[in-house]
Amino acid sequence: MDFEALHSANFTLLDDTVSDWTSMLTKLETLKRDAEEGLYGRAKKADWAGYNATVSREFIGKTAGEFGDAVIQATSIRNIMRDTRDELKTQQRLLQEAIERGRGRNLTVSANGGGFTVRENPDKKAPGGQSDVDALRDELQSILNKATEIDNTASTSLKALVDLADHGFSDAAYKDRDTAANALKEAERLAALARKKPEDLTVEDFDALHAGLKKYAGDELFAERLAEQLGARGTLDFWAGVSDPRSAYQVGHKRVDQFDDLQKHLSLTLATATRADTPEMANWKHEMTSLGSQSLARNGTTMGFQVMSNLMRWGDYDDQFLTSYGTELIKTEKKLSSNGQHVPLAWQHMDMEPYLNRTGTDSGSDPMVGFLKALSNSPDAATDFFSAPFLSKDEDHEFKTKDKDGNEVKDALSNFDYLFEERDWPQERNSEGEDSIEGRNNLALALEAATTGHRAGEMPTPDLAPHSEAQATLMSAIVASVEEDPKRLTDHAHMSDSMGQIASEYLPDINRALADDPRGNTDRLFPLAGAQAKLDHKDVTAFLITVGQNPDGYAAVEVGQKAYMASLMDYHLDPDLPADKRYPHSAQETIETITRRSGEVSGSLAIGMQEALLGPAAKEAKEFSDSVAQQKNAWSGAIGTGIGVGVSFIATPVGGAVAGGVAGTVSGMVLEHIFQQSETDVLTGASRSASDLWEKSRDLSAEHGQLAAINAAKKHELPQPEQTADWALTGRDNGFSDAATNARGMADHLTTEVPAA
């Protein structure tokens, strides 16, 4: 910065700019409030249907969210501008004070082009002579250097902040210039360390990288700058090099126990970086995708996909990047496996190869494993990926299906078909030497995200959009596939917890399918927003029985269905329900029909549980009770009593009713009763025989149905509410009878006897 520019700077314009941004913030806060409470608030209360239930409502939600991001970005800009102004004013004051002190020591400072000159007064020398001249010159230069740094870093930070979002606004928040500037400096410092040859990387370097990534992983400026400085190839070389004990022997010897944490925070950092819309990150993502199928010279046969996929196991990666990456990964997989007809040998871990994954679950040699974990955190990308084609009928392959005449013909496969049904997974072992379950487990998690629209392992929220056509179609494919071959789940039981969660969020669709009433009033009885999964009754029965063999899968559906049943009764017995939404039958018929469908779900699950307890697997009843009890924790942060109506669509009407302080609701009381029963392990004494287990399940279902019916009737002041207990019991009897009858189609897949209808 020029001497004269700082010395004579007039900060009025900068003061006005800061004031204008502060005023802008007030206006943006008002717009944000109007958008959230007005625009989006009304949208959430509206009764959407069809296309509007998914696309329009989601668009309004994202638009309202942009106002919030605008406030965050404007606040960061104002903060940086204000901090820069205040710091420059400080440097100007220090400059002027230093000049004034110099005048007292007979020194004169004058501007000289862009610089300055310090001289002794000709008529009176400085007390320290030339040493005083040099000292003042150095002090002034130091002040100018600091001012220059402030100006430059402010400019760099503001430009980087604005560049983060090509469209809309960034949600990166910075309290002052130093915070933003330090993030950029630290990114450049750590990138320089990561570019070192792995054999030259010291323990101190590793510690600096580890601490820096852990601190800044979610910082958008840091993440974008680090990825930009490293480049796609540098990112791959770094992780491949660090992971190879033959190269990074210094850190490998002393810090191997921290590699998993470094992997996690590098993954989180890169995920953050991919969401930046800068030209540099666009190039990074394009180059990374292109490098996926290429071998890294340093590691011989190790390919880019194998390295990068292990840096995708944490964080929310950009959807478009995941889509492009997944498309190229599938192309490479097809090439290496002869269109999916054998194990991709390049993905098979060999003894001498480094472990690219440091979590202990698997070696990291199969890139599909880490990529599927990334999809589990990115629902939209997951839906697109599984819906995409893997093979057409015209390609060279041997996958067959039967046409309408029963003749075998070539089949077309989607990515879902290939991964769920046909893929030969490379053999993997975990750090304990046991067969790894990580690949298929991540597949189940990715399918959970793809079908539900939210991250795997989370519960639905009020803002979740109703199911799209693509999500519902994928759900239909899963159910049909499990019916075709239940071993796709029973041989990989660790997938069933996700399958249970998926089913719990498609309960309106499942109940509609069990009703077998395409032209009746089932749509009113089980209202649904968004797209409906087209499910066949026998497929649903087989799916429920199969999922019911796993304690976690059983618990997710059983608890969800009971809460759904209770919410339906509360909804339909409400006298204020509009006529065009009302189920056109008596309260008795309504309760009987709801409990019949719920009984069939519970009965089908009970048959699955019976198979697990009394069949070859020989599980303990306590496992099922424990899983039901754990559902209370899973639901503790979830919301309300949505039943699939309008924007309150939450197919699992979950237990904010229990943990959220509204246990007085109908669903809340039913849920609390279920959880109390699970704590006393009521199933244990019933596991001695199939008949005992069946009867205990029927008894529990009756209790839940009667409790829901009585409380809904009391809440809405129906006459003789105790009568509803008899109606619920009739529905339960019919439902369990339906389950037993329909389960006979599954008999060939079961080792225990199907209960009598």
Image (cartoon, helix red, strand yellow):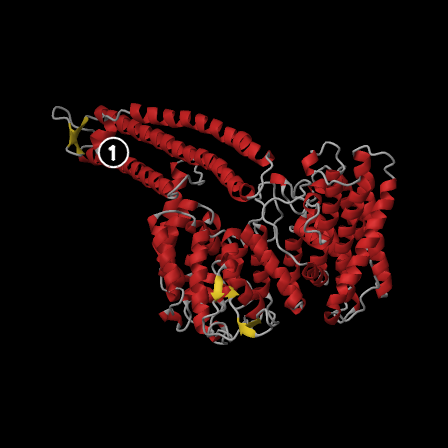
Query: Could you say which is closer to the camera, residue 628 or residue 75?
Result: 628
Residue at 85% from the left image edge and 34% from the top image edge: 719
Q: Which x, y percent locates residue 176?
A: 41, 35
* Image vertical order of residue 548 relative to residue 61, above or below: below
Observer able to see residue 404: yes
Query: Could you say which is closer to the camera, residue 282 or residue 38?
Result: 38
Q: Which x, y percent locates residue 325?
A: 43, 59
Relative side of 394 to 166, left or right = right
Locate the C terminus and report the quarter of the image it occupies: bottom right
* Image vertical order of residue 657 relative to residue 102, above or below: below
Locate the N terminus and report the quarter of the image it occupies: top left
Q: Where on the picture, by quarter, is residue 85?
A: top left
Query: Could you say which is closer to the camera, residue 310 or residue 642?
Result: 642
Observer able to see residue 261: no
Relative side of 607 to 258, left or right = right
* Image vertical order of residue 598 relative to residue 32, above or below: below
Residue at 88% from the left image edge and 36% from the top image edge: 720
Q: What element carries label 1?
A: helix
Q: Residues within 10 Å of mark 1 (few under 14, many from 20)?
A: many
Q: Which x, y percent locates residue 196?
A: 36, 61
- Badge 1 is on which residue? 140
Q: Which amino acid does label 1 sit on?
A: Leu
Query: Could you say which is closer to the camera, residue 226 or residue 577?
Result: 577
* Image vertical order of residue 349 relative to residue 582, above or below: below
